[in-house]
Amino acid sequence: MSSTVITTDGLLPKPQAEEVNYLNVEHTISSWLLTGDHKRIAILYLISTTFFFFLGSVAAGLIRYELTSPAGVALESDTYNKVFTAHGVIMVFGFLVVAIPAVFGNFVLPLCIGARDLAFPRLNLGSWYMYMTGGSIILAGMITGGVDTGWTFYTPYSSMYSNTQVSLVLVGIFIAGFSTITTGINFVVTIHKMRAPGMTWFRLPLFVWAMYATSLQMILATPVVAITLLLVVVERTFKLPIFSPELGGDPVLFQHLFWFYSHPAVYIMILPGFAVVSELIANFSRKRIFGYHFVAFSSLAIAGLGFLVWGHHMFVSSQSMYESIVFSLLSYLVAVPSAVKIFNWTATMYKGNVRLASPMIYALAFLMIFTIGGLTGLFLGSAGSDIHLTATYFVVAHFHYVMVGGVSLAYMGALHYWWPKMTGRMYAEGIAKANAILIFVGFNLTFFPQFIVGYLGMPRRYHYYYFAPEFQAYHIMSTLGSSVLGLGFILPAFYLTYSLFKGKKAPANPWGAHGLEWETSSPPPVTNFLETPIVMDEVYDFDPVSEHAENMKALEKAEQAENTSEGQH
Amino acid sequence: MSAITETSDHGHGHHPGLHHQYEDMAQQTESYIVGMWVFLTTEIMFFGALFFIYTLYRWNYQLDFYIAHEHLDWKLGAFNTTVLLFSSFTMVMAVQSAQLKKRIAVMNYLGVTVLCAITFLVVKYFEYSSKFADHLYPGVNFATDAKAAFGEHAFEAGKLAVNMNHAQLFYGLYFCMTGLHAIHIIVGIGIIIALIRLWFNKANSVIHDYVPTEMVGLYWHFVDLVWIFLFPLFYLMPKPH
């Protein structure tokens, strides 16, 4: 299927003028800000999530700088609390939850299933506006005083004691949450109802399967955190007691409701990462993914089990021992579908025709880093070892391995993989490969020492550690790594922007990948496909025999077309 | 010719109510309906958290909640329930009229639905006012004298049996949940009025396609259904043993 396009490209006469595509069809600002085109909305999201990622990274840089000395360097304790809260809130709600679904899901998902657009284009644009409104309110809160509760907003501190901009920021998160919900609704309806003829469920690329699982979680979990955070606002502003311990309310109930969302939210963040990596590994190994059905259903299993494990965040929050045991066992269960994925990806590469292009290097880095992140998750999921490790840098290192290592590596992989499709330009492959390795090294240098220092007892959210000056070596290593990591995230901004102006024109399918999005031109026309595609072959069909047959069919078709046009003359 | 293309699968944009991203009306209709039900699922999760909190606190403080609920007027609640049930009926009739393309009937039924919704809010206003008057709105001014607030209900076997802190939790949940429901009613009124306007202007999106009207109907039934749960939970409590 993929090579079809290459063959016909060679045979059909080249178009003279530049084709009309979604980028050059209109140039006014209002044509961008009022667009219903999922591809343009994806670009809007790409720019805005990059902006929030930048802000979150600045906060991260401040944290790392502060921790280079056991007695702190520059920040007051209050300011430090606000900085790490800003880092958490902006990164989680402004970047991680939205990044891959809203940018690449928006851009690629309709292309993957052969649809002209998402089911509800105006709702899609509305999602972006909600995201921007929510994000702006969060930033307004950060600028007018900040928040010192941490991104978890635990009551009663957040509802009764904190004198910072808690309400404003929570309203911002509430609105941004609705943007996630509407995106989820849009994806579910699109996947159910907008597939091209012949695109059966088991011909869906795994990207789409994982997006489906993500959307289910967005739909079922986000409303719960939305109402929970809203209740904190209601408690602060209207004085309606919900979690008030002084009246007999239960502040720990907030934690239950919060983690009922926020644990699935972890999978809302990582499943899109899985989505991307499945695509990258299959396409750069030129092999049908090993155990397609298992990988597809493991996404759904993760989505389902993800709802049953929230209690492992609360082993030390007055939860009964029996609850802890049950949640601990359920948490082990989630490791099974995650491991299914890892093994299947590895097995896909075995005897595949692996090509180490830059997106594939990101995928391999993801595999290694996510495995470490996942395995250390088991230490934290077992109640016994968790009691020692709770609220230490071990936890910080674990979730950065999963979220930063997992999500941002997959994000970078997706960006490099679909960049030619999105912009129609090729970037410099050499520097992109070097950058992937730079990020991998920087990432491990940043976060691996945190496992050790956390195990030794460094508490999270502290900016002094004069009680244990021997930790300084680990912190300096970590800060050094974060500078390398920062460089790794800044470089792409330059070489990708450079490629926009000076890059080679991208062909329709620069990677020889398999999938409907590679059958249309780069960048795609406004309606995605000039005519509705009909899917005839299986997913990731890199089988040489059927590929040859496809090529022959395309040749025949082209010859026929030539013959008929000759006949007309 | 146009009749043929309208019935064929590839009638791009030939049906006046068809949007460009869909192949045909069947696909559009199904997408709308699936989308609406998925949205209602998110609404269930949204209210679900509050129902969960209510269940937990009522389980913990059964007698306090029972005594606190005595101040609510079940007659007004029952009246409001009837009003909403009747509005559900008129909404059903509006959707049916939309399917039969009876434009005037649709507008009439939707109009009655809006009137019912406004009646509901007026009754709610009087109920809320009586709570405010008796200092039953949570906060520093919450009633401290149980006897003044609940009369003889506050006593169990001659002893004061209600903890005013827990009564405050009850009213916190009451205002929170009925308030959130009232917000949904207000949004519903807005949506229905917008729909009436579309029908009044003979907009293509509604007169050729009953599905938008049906979606508003689904939303309205959901709002009614929430009240069907709220009414017995707050107004009709049995005495705990």
Image: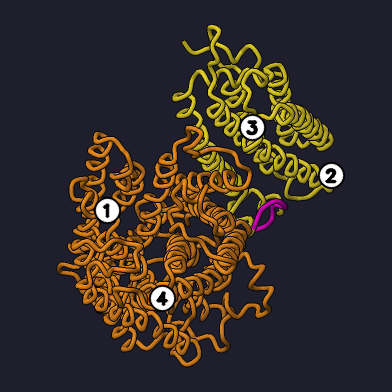
Chain colours: A orange, B yellow
Cβ atoms at labels 4 and 1 below 8 Å apart: no
Q: Is residue A488 visible?
A: yes
The residue under label 1 is A390
- Estimate the x, y position of residue A407 in percent, counting from the top left: 36, 65
Three-letter residue code for mark 3: Phe
Q: Give how far apart the Cα atoms at labels 1 and 2 are.
A: 62 Å
For the question of whether residue A357 can be seen, the reply is no
> What residue lies at 61% left-to-right and 56% top-to-bottom?
A123
Residue range in magenta is B13-19
Circles 2 and 3 on the same chain? yes
Which label is found at residue B142? 3
For disc 4, the marked residue is A62
Residue B18: in magenta span = yes
Q: How would you rate the neighbour count of disc 2 (Cα within 10 Å): few for under 14, some for 14-19, many for 20 or more?
A: some
Rendered residue at 73%/49% (across/down): B205
Of mark 2 and mark 3, the one earlier in the sequence is: 3
Query: Which x, y percent locates residue A360?
Result: 28, 74
Task: State the SS at label 2.
Answer: helix
Frontmost of labels 1 and 3 is 3
For the residue marked with disc 4, what is the amino acid? Leu
Q: Which residue is denoted by mark 2 in the rendering?
A: B200
Please report the residue visible at 34 percent of the width from the left and 84 percent of the height from the top: A432
Give neighbour class at mark 1: few <14, some 14-19, many 20+ (Cα, 10 Å): many
State which chain disc 4 sits on. Answer: A
Q: Residues within 10 Å of mark 3 (few under 14, many from 20)?
A: some
Whichever of labels 4 and 1 marks the residue nearer the N terminus, that label is 4
